[in-house]
């Protein structure tokens, strides 16, 4: 017997959403898969359609071409990207043993800013795979953000007195 496709309401199981740059779609995690959902009309797409694999924390690239996410298809939570219509997963080079807390694309969609549970912040070049430590804050994870031209990262690092100071990191250096 062949099994016929069926519809299942997974709205109560959705989390970790990211709005597309155009505002026309939303990518969410539901039941361990990534779904692209239209804002108004259109089809809902299962982008990953995996069995026994969990995907989470999707983030849409600013150019709208790809989605970064954490997946455990190799048995360990790792960072991947895929085309926004679904397709081949690309493994992103992250520091060995790093536990991924959060990440964000640069405005030009060419790099990722990765924060780990070990309070480290890295910049990852998506084309070359180069990973550079931006800073480590032993006082706790703090705020950081990209400059609009993707050349700088501004962040606040706490001093021994717990007061924060603003720093700029030159991404091209």
Image (cartoon, grey):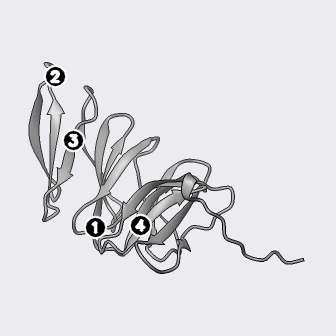
Residue corresponding to mark 1: 110
Residue beneath the point at 9% across and 33% down: 165
Rendered location of residue 27, percent (x, y): 44, 65
**Tag shown at residue 155:** none
**Tag shown at residue 143:** 3
Query: Mark 1 and mark 4: span between their CA atoms?
Result: 21 Å
The residue tagged with tag 2: helix, strand or loop? loop
Which is more foreground, mark 1 or mark 3?
3
**Tag shown at residue 162:** 2
Of 55 and 30, nearer the camera is 30
N-term mark: 4 or 3: 4
Q: Residues within 10 Å of mark 2 (few under 14, many from 20)?
A: few
Res 59 visible: no
Query: Mark 4 and mark 2: span between their CA atoms?
Result: 38 Å
Which is more foreground, mark 4 or mark 2?
4
Of 170 and 16, nearer the camera is 16
N-term mark: 1 or 4: 4
The residue tagged with tag 3: helix, strand or loop? loop
Does the residue at mark 4 contact the one at mark 3 (Cβ under 8 Å)?
no
The residue tagged with tag 1: helix, strand or loop? loop
The outermost residue toward the bottom is: 42
Q: Residues within 10 Å of mark 4 (few under 14, many from 20)?
A: many
Rendered location of residue 92, percent (x, y): 43, 59
Residue corresponding to mark 4: 26
Query: Mark 2 and mark 1: span between their CA atoms?
Result: 33 Å
């Amino acid at each position: 017997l062949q099994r016929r496709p069926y519809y299942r309401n997974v709205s109560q199981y959705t989390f970790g959403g990211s709005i597309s740059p155009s505002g026309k779609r939303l990518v969410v995690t539901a039941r361990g898969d990534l779904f692209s959902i239209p804002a108004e009309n259109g089809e809902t797409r299962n982008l990953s359609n995996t069995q026994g694999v969990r995907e989470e924390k999707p983030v849409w690239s600013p150019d709208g071409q790809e989605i970064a996410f954490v997946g455990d298809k190799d048995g360990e939570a790792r960072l991947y990207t895929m085309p926004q219509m679904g397709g081949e997963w690309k493994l992103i080079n992250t520091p060995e043993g790093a536990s991924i807390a959060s990440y964000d694309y640069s405005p030009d969609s060419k790099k990722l800013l990765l924060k780990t549970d070990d309070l480290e912040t890295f910049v990852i070049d998506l084309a070359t795979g180069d990973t550079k430590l931006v800073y480590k804050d032993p006082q706790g994870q703090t705020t950081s953000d990209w400059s609009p031209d993707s050349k700088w990262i501004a962040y606040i690092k706490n001093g021994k007195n717990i007061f924060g100071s603003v720093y700029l990191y030159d991404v091209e250096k």
